[in-house]
């Protein structure tokens, strides 16, 4: 529902939005793969937009797993003019460590690699961002216990193109739009206006 509220905000500003459920989320079939296959969903959404609106300038907006998947899709192909990413982890291994500090991160990583037949390094926003030249706005929620602040700092610092980082004060994971709405709207609105027109 948080993305619906963001889409309403974008509509008020005159932007068109496409919202979709990742695999295994909402009404979509399949199973969540915590970043291994979700970039394919983003690429499918981009293909849909290019087919039905070939002249529309495109930007991306994602948070948490959505932000990670958006970066992976952007690293595979261009096509977006810019992207806003909230609460994006730097690597999946670090994200697992933040959520399961008492468990064996290496053991969980091995199980994930066996399940999806891919190395865990495939889900690596820090590596993806080095191949993205489009402007990026990173938002980090200051009270986020899921994603440490150094993740957003590293992502912004390592981006191939221009990047900005806003640390939203007193906000929880992916809640900047709800808990700091005026500043969120100002920063997102200005970023989109600068890069989409």
Image (tube, rainbow, N blue to C red):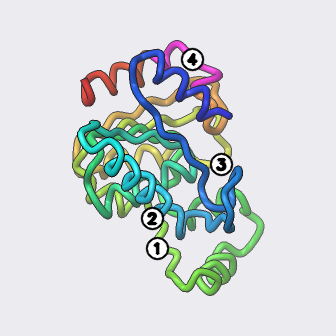
Rendered location of residue 55, percent (x, y): 24, 39
- Spatial CA distance of label 3 from label 2 is 16 Å
Quadrant location, the C terminus: top left
Residue at the farthest front position: 52
In primary-sequence order, the first of circles 4 and 1 is 1
Which numbered mark, 3 or 2, is in the foreground of this view?
2
Give the camera-side residue of 44 and 112.
Answer: 44
Q: Position of residue 183 (x, y in %)?
A: 49, 16
Q: Is residue 18 magenta?
A: no
User: Which SS does the magenta portion mostly show?
Assistant: helix
Element at badge 3?
A: loop
Q: Is residue 7 left or right of residue 24?
A: left
Q: Is residue 182 magenta?
A: yes
Q: Nearer the viewer, residue 192 or 113?
A: 192
Specify start and end residues of the magenta stretch as a single range.
Answer: 177-185
Q: Earlier in the sequence, mark 3 or mark 4?
A: 3
The CA distance from mark 1 to mark 2 is 5 Å
Q: Do callouts 4 and 2 mark residues in contact (Cβ within 8 Å)? A: no
Q: Position of residue 13 (x, y in %)?
A: 42, 17
Reading the image, the residue beneath label 2 is: 124
Is disc 2 surrounded by few (<14), some (14 to 19) or many (20+) residues within 10 Å? many
Numbered mark located on residue 146 in the image:
3
State the mark number for residue 121: 1
> How many numbered markers are drawn?
4
Q: Residues within 10 Å of mark 3 (few under 14, many from 20)?
A: many
Q: CA distance from mark 4 to mark 2?
A: 29 Å
Q: Which mark is residue 181?
A: 4
Question: Quick one: quadrant of the N terminus?
Answer: top right
Q: Nearer the viewer, mark 4 or mark 1?
A: 4
Is 115 located above or below residue 27 in the figure?
below
Horizontally, residue 56 falls left or right of residue 107, namely left
**Furthest-top residue in view?**
182
């Amino acid at each position: 529902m948080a993305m619906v509220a963001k889409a309403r905000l974008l509509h008020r500003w005159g932007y068109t939005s496409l919202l979709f459920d990742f695999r295994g989320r909402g009404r979509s079939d399949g199973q969540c793969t915590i970043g291994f296959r979700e970039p394919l969903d983003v690429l499918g959404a981009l293909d849909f937009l290019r087919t039905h609106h070939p002249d529309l300038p495109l930007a991306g907006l994602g948070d948490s797993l959505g932000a990670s998947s958006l970066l992976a899709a952007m690293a595979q192909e261009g096509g977006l003019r810019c992207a806003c990413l909230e609460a994006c982890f730097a690597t999946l291994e670090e994200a697992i460590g933040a959520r399961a500090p008492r468990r064996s991160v290496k053991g969980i990583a091995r199980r994930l690699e066996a399940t999806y037949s891919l190395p865990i390094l495939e889900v690596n926003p820090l590596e993806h961002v080095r191949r993205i030249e489009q402007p990026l706005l990173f938002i980090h929620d200051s009270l986020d216990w899921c994603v440490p602040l150094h993740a957003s700092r590293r992502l912004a610092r390592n981006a191939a193109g221009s990047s900005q980082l806003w640390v939203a004060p007193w906000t929880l994971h992916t809640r900047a739009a709800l808990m700091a709405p005026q500043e969120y709207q100002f920063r997102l609105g200005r970023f989109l206006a600068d890069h989409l027109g």
